[in-house]
Image: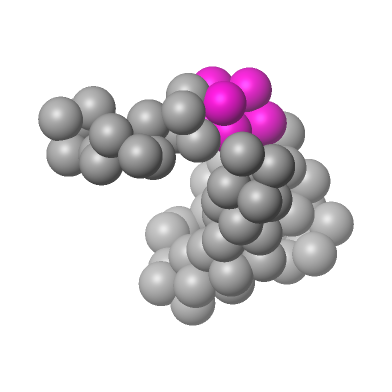
Amino acid sequence: MRDDITRESIGFVDSYYFHEFLKSYSDYMENTLNKRVLGTVFSWDDYDKIKVELIDVAYNNYFSKL
């Protein structure tokens, strides 16, 4: 929910999640974790990797350009 996102992060969410995340997530799941995107059961271990290697990198890149 947008109300749960800080005002500072709205631009990142709009930019990254609406335009880049699904492609980078799919590529990461299939090419790095060797898992299918559809049919893979959620795991916190996978999420922790995705957070560090995709989301945190994109977040830091976004704010370093402001």
Looking at this rendering, what residue extends furthest in the front direction?
66
> What is the x, y in percent for residue 3?
15, 30
Foreground pick, 39 / 16: 16
**Residue at (25%, 41%) from the top-left corner?**
6
Q: Which residue is drawn at 39% across and 40% down?
A: 9
The secondary structure that dominates the magenta segment is helix
Query: Quadrant of residue 32 in the image?
Result: bottom right
User: Quadrant of residue 8 in the image?
Assistant: top left
Of all residues, the one furthest to the right in this rendering is 31
The magenta stretch is: 15-21
Decide: is 15 above or below 37: above
- Residue found at the far left of this picture: 3
Is residue 32 shown to the viewer in this render? yes
Q: Residue 29 location in percent, x, y?
A: 69, 55
**Residue 54 shows up from this direction:** no
The reply to whether the magenta stretch includes residue 18 is: yes
Percent x, y of residue 20:
67, 31
Q: In the displayed structure, does residue 31 sit left or right of residue 47?
A: right
Q: How many labels does the image show?
A: 0
**Residue 35 or 16: which is nearer the viewer?**
16
Q: Where is residue 12 in the image (x, y as percent from the top left)?
A: 50, 35
In the rendered image, the quadrant that contains the N terminus is: top left
Q: Which residue is drawn at 58% across and 69% down?
A: 52
The color scheme shown is one colour
Quarter holding the C terminus is: top right
Compared with 44, 21 (above or below) is: above
Left or right, residue 65 beside residue 2? right
Q: Is residue 34 left or right of residue 21?
A: right
Residue 5: in magenta span: no
